[in-house]
Amino acid sequence: MTSTAQDAYAALIAHVRKTATLSTTAGILSWDQEVMMPSSAGAVAFRGEQMAQLAGLVHGMATDPRIAEWLDACEADGELTADAHGPAAVNVRELRRHYDRSTKLPASLVEEFSRTTSTAKHEWVAARKAKEYAKFEPWLAKLVKLQRQRAECWGWPSDGEAWDALADGYEPGLTAASCAAVLNPLRGPLVELVAELRESSTPPSQAFNEVKLPIDKQMSFVRMVVTRVGFDFDRGRLDESAHPFCSGMHRDDVRMTTRFQENLLNDAIGSTLHESGHGMYEQHLPGGEHVGTPYGEAVSLAIHESQSRLIENHVGRSESFWRWCYPLMRDHFGAALADLSFEDVYGGANAMLTPSLIRVEADEAQYNLHIMIRFEIERALMRGDLTTADLPGVWNERYREYLGVEVPDDAKGCMQDIHWAMGAMGYFPTYTLGTLHAAQFYETAERDLGGLDSDFAAGRFDRLTGWLHENIHARGSAYLPADLGELVTGKPLSAEPLLRHLRGKLRAVYGLD
Amino acid sequence: MTSTAQDAYAALIAHVRKTATLSTTAGILSWDQEVMMPSSAGAVAFRGEQMAQLAGLVHGMATDPRIAEWLDACEADGELTADAHGPAAVNVRELRRHYDRSTKLPASLVEEFSRTTSTAKHEWVAARKAKEYAKFEPWLAKLVKLQRQRAECWGWPSDGEAWDALADGYEPGLTAASCAAVLNPLRGPLVELVAELRESSTPPSQAFNEVKLPIDKQMSFVRMVVTRVGFDFDRGRLDESAHPFCSGMHRDDVRMTTRFQENLLNDAIGSTLHESGHGMYEQHLPGGEHVGTPYGEAVSLAIHESQSRLIENHVGRSESFWRWCYPLMRDHFGAALADLSFEDVYGGANAMLTPSLIRVEADEAQYNLHIMIRFEIERALMRGDLTTADLPGVWNERYREYLGVEVPDDAKGCMQDIHWAMGAMGYFPTYTLGTLHAAQFYETAERDLGGLDSDFAAGRFDRLTGWLHENIHARGSAYLPADLGELVTGKPLSAEPLLRHLRGKLRAVYGLD
């Protein structure tokens, strides 16, 4: 290894860690705004100024031309990056990707895109409220045009398409073709399963989702649950916010939020377990010198989502989990839960909501069909196979076909999500890819460890989480998402494990065995 | 006004507001660390990195050499600063002071001072724990030497002394001589009053400070009290922390903390009212274009303290306040307070703690004697009239003389406060100057408005707070502290109003009328 490359690498890493430190400062301000900040208009406006200032400073550091020089020097030295999954190679690989993505767009396009999404978000809010897609459509059309321009600047593989360039920002290496290759085989069987469950004459009881429980007791209960599952409160927090989220400021300062409604303890447990899956990933990323470097970061949105879905669904909706949780819950809430049987609770945690119109309210099975519809539509928009004018018709038709539901208006239809309005295309599939990874990881963990259900029934989660720490969390960004999945499970990502999981559990819950 | 001066002033203000924005970001991180951050060693260390990074960025902006050029251009234009109390003149005056103070110290001295205080703080903790002043003394000696060097760099008026240069950083215009001129006349009468009260055979009941009350009910009660007094929770927060404080991030985002112990509702009410006095000052500073400029900031520590002491003592320890508060308190806490009479509560809120050894636990009367001892000692240290070796002897002698108390060891004596160890000399007197300003402001408000006691007894505080907003808060830094006091009250600051207040109230509470 040349001393030039060594010096360049050291300078690059020092610079990148400084950039990350400032970026986490913005993360604290953002968390504070969602969770703590007074809601006065003055506070909101001033926080906007603070965030814009930090964004400007971070952008300046992230696009510093010295980064290109350092990267060139590092890449010229084969020895430095000889171990493709070692810190140096991974950092150079990821920093090159970040730097190129940050610098390939002309400033005029960055500005126009930022201005357009800013307005489009407001227009989306107004159009959604008025249930008038026609008001939003010109903005979406403009955004699709700008997304194509951005994709052109970034470029995509010769056998690929424009959508790939957008997706790569969320999920390194993801292409529309590879995405379709795992989602398409899921669609038919899932539509069939959902229809079968919907027709069941013995659906689970909904009593669990009707009982009212005091919020403060719900908070102390979910806190106990996620502590037991393995979230470390000495290195993290749990608060309330309008939409649950998890912010990893640093592996020793991971902050989750959740939400409560009196009659939705089930939702609070599911949401908090979901966020604790994200949180434990952040808490067990590579530490020390890797903090603030790409190697020490979560590798992708789908892998992040795999951790939250695994804890939410494979742990938190399992029969064995409820064998442990149900008696504790009865003790904790006392008389209020006296009439709920085990079957009410376990069934209620796995009941489908029908008709299923809204993605964020969807259950474990139907959720993925919501995602597929979005993926198919945004891919068609980017290819030019679908115009924004024709979008609502296609949307409603797919909802009828996949979910057996009539969309009453565009507010409950194609305008339900903010993602496209805020400029996020290529993002939706990461939710379902994460769910697929979760099922495949969980099957592998059970194969490797055995007896996880006995663990859960005894309130023991450490063997599973230890496996996740070792196989996924501690690897940071060492492997690209698809490679990580294959390394850990021995197979490429497929729809089968999720289908096995859903069929096995839900058919029993719906009395169809 | 020349366009050069106008342009320079505009550039200066834009730069200063950006600096202030970044500085408030550091304020959020600091608040977060005290109130929200997980306490893991990793989180603490990383927060240190974040804070150091922001401090470096802010320092770079605050010492930007362009500031000198802009200030020169502004100062050369008589018209721009013609109105001595208008925004332009005030901003130029204060920015000149800040800039000169920031740039007059050589970097080597700044570094040595920072390194020394950092170690001295640790040594102070250890020496205090071991009750061994001898271990701390060499560090204090070194700090006194460095403080003299800093003072030399900053300079002081020809008729002044080195202490003045330190005090000016906290209280613009304050000198040891002017400070002594108001504190000395306070000493004798206060020592006399305290001795008289101590000898009373009919001291107030301490029952209020013995009853145990649940913390969550204390929190909801003090929140109700400070809301009623006028702290705006749409533009602020109240949380818990080890030491109560108030951070003004922005006038629309003001955050107070308080502390609770089961048997100290009295302390919680007093502490929270104290912080709400600071908080209301911050919430009513000049807004709009003045945010982030010196004109829009609180003028000094003593004026800030006057607002907290006024609300804590003149409102919150008054008989009329308790006429309103006592029945509400009985309703709120129910049976737990059934045995407390009005006299128990009002008396308990005004009872002296004897012997009074610890400043932060001291009552309204004795507190100022603690401060005087520190002022006299730090002034003597800076003049070279006292060596650090002789400090404990002098300390203990003054405590005997002023407070009638024997100091058992140096941990409860001259090592009780962190201020000197952290490099804050010239700071202590601002506490008592604030208390004096509070008494003088309150007398003036009562003279201007009349009937404040009837207001308080009816739970009405808006006439008083309106007067404070108009006369003090909205003036920001338009007037230097001493000038502001004289402008509002018509007289130079004196000890008389405080003595009248303390004698009038405490002699009655102690049955000496």
Image (cartoon, coloured by chain):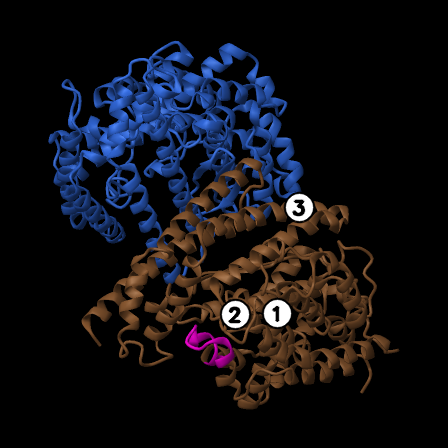
Chain colours: A blue, B brown
Q: Can residue B248 be found in the magenta stretch? A: no
> Mark 2 sits on what residue?
B171
Q: Quadrant of residue B491?
A: bottom right
- Relative to A222, say whether B367 is above or below: below
Q: In which quarter of the image is residue B206?
A: bottom right
- Relative to B38, say whether A191 is above or below: above
Q: Quadrant of residue B6?
A: bottom left
Labels 3 and 2 touching (C-beta < 8 A) = no
Q: Is mark 3 on a helix, strand or loop?
A: helix
Disc 1 residue crowd, few under 14, some 14–19, many 20+, Cα 10 Å:
many
> Mark 1 sits on what residue?
B429
The quadrant of the picture occupied by the C terminus of chain B is bottom right
The span shown in magenta is B471-484
- Relative to A234, say whether B21 is above or below: below
Labels 2 and 1 touching (C-beta < 8 A) = yes
Q: Is mark 2 on a helix, strand or loop?
A: loop
Give the label on residue B123, or none.
3
Q: Is mark 1 on a helix, strand or loop?
A: helix
Image x and y of residue B122, in percent: 64, 45
The residue positioned 72% from the left and 74% from the top of the image is B365
